[in-house]
């Protein structure tokens, strides 16, 4: 009996000592945590290490991370309300878990302090300090970039790297939806910085605006005199070639095909954001499309090879044979507006100017 009593007493002492040790450790942990956030002598809160505080990928801020009433994460960048569009678009991007200064390593907030204080900053705000390829490679290994943008596309990173094509040449849209280059904040719906929130960021920079589009690829290929053949970038059988486009006369007859199905043209030759058809309408759907589309009018504004020194004598017969709509793809009857060549019919002729017809729907 005495033996059992001594054993029970010893067990009780052991349990008591262990419980006391656990309580002391808990008090020690709580005390350290409070000390790290608040100075007990002054009552002031210590500063936040903004550069290492990422947002969550749902655009609502990370766990325990403060946001303002608009849902914008509080960090060093969002202290200035004119930066809320950039912060909000970052929060809704695939890089939301990466802190700002991980990529913008060389940015010094003081370099724009005077412009901020005076309200003299230009719209749209854009950074002069470009993110370097070295920063991208610190997370992304080029030799492992086997995934493509869409199932049909071929994107050989090793060839682009060998050609010294910078990462941002193709991927500058990813984090901020390219809102600076697109001049989003100069538009009425997005001009008030203090009204930016997560919902507005998703509207201003949807996923389709965060991917390189065909304009980016073709423009770069043309500038570098690299092939623009379909099969160079597409491997689906029905997209490897376009027999119509390989026709030597395609540059002359493509407008006729466009009139039959302008939406087929828009699959590749439309940036999905700009106005699709010019207004007022010319009455010719393909001319309306061409005048609103930089891919088209960028070529139409150039003088064609057949418009040589003898063109003035030849053009009446050409207009009669091909029809006036062919001429109005590049010219206007009267003094033209934007995106049409400055040479117009009524410089010499007296064509009546009809009332603009209602635009035709495709």
Image (cartoon, helix red, strand yellow):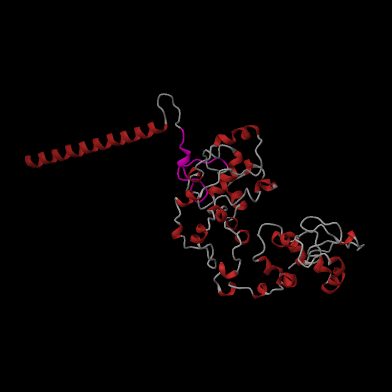
List x then y, in percent, for residue 222.
63, 61
106 sits to left or right of 343: left
- Magenta-colored stretch includes residue 210: no
Q: Tell me where the magenta segment starts and ends, as one range.
A: 47-69
Residue extending farthest left: 2
List x then y, in percent, for residue 208.
59, 58
On screen, residue 245 above or below 181: below
Q: Quadrant of the C terminus?
A: bottom right
On screen, residue 292 above or below 11: below
Of residues 7 and 29, the one nearer the viewer is 29
- Do we see residue 88 in this rendering? yes
- Do we see residue 259 in this rendering? no
- Magenta-colored stretch includes residue 57: yes
On screen, residue 344 above or below 112: below
295 sits to left or right of 320: left
> Which residue lies at the image location 71% right of the left edge and 72% below the top edge?
250
Magenta span dominant secondary structure: loop
Residue extending farthest top: 41
List x then y, in percent, for residue 354.
88, 63
């Amino acid at each position: 009996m005495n033996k059992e009593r001594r054993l029970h007493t010893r067990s009780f002492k052991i349990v008591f000592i262990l419980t006391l040790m656990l309580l002391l450790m808990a008090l020690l942990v709580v005390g350290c945590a409070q000390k790290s956030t608040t100075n007990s002598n002054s009552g002031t809160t210590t500063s936040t290490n903004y550069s290492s505080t990422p947002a969550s990928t749902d655009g609502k801020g990370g766990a325990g991370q403060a946001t303002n009433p608009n849902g914008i994460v509080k960090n060093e960048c969002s202290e200035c309300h004119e930066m809320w569009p950039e912060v909000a678009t970052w929060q809704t991007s695939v890089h939301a878990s990466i802190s700002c200064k991980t990529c913008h390593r060389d940015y010094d907030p003081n370099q724009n302090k005077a412009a901020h204080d005076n309200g003299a900053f230009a719209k749209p705000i854009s950074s002069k300090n470009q993110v370097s390829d070295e920063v991208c490679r610190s997370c992304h290994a080029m030799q492992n970039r086997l995934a493509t943008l869409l199932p049909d596309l071929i994107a050989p990173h090793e060839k682009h790297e060998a050609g010294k094509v910078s990462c941002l040449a193709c991927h500058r849209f990813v984090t901020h939806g390219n809102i600076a280059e697109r001049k989003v904040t100069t538009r009425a719906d997005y001009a008030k910085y203090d009204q930016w929130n997560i919902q507005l960021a998703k509207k201003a920079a949807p996923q389709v605006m965060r991917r390189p589009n065909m304009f980016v690829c073709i423009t770069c290929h043309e500038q570098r005199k690299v092939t623009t053949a379909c099969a160079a970038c597409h491997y689906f059988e029905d997209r490897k070639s376009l027999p119509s486009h390989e026709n030597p006369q395609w540059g002359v007859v493509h407008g006729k095909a466009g009139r039959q199905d302008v939406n087929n043209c828009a699959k590749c030759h439309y940036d999905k954001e700009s106005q699709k058809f010019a207004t007022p309408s010319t009455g010719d759907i393909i001319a309306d499309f061409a005048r609103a589309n930089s891919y088209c009018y960028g070529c139409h504004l150039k003088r064609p090879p057949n418009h040589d020194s003898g063109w003035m004598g030849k053009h009446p017969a050409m207009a009669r044979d091909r029809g006036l709509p062919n001429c109005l793809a590049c010219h206007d009857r009267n003094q033209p507006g934007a995106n049409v060549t400055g040479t117009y019919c009524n410089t010499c002729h007296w064509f009546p100017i009809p009332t603009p017809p209602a635009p035709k729907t495709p």
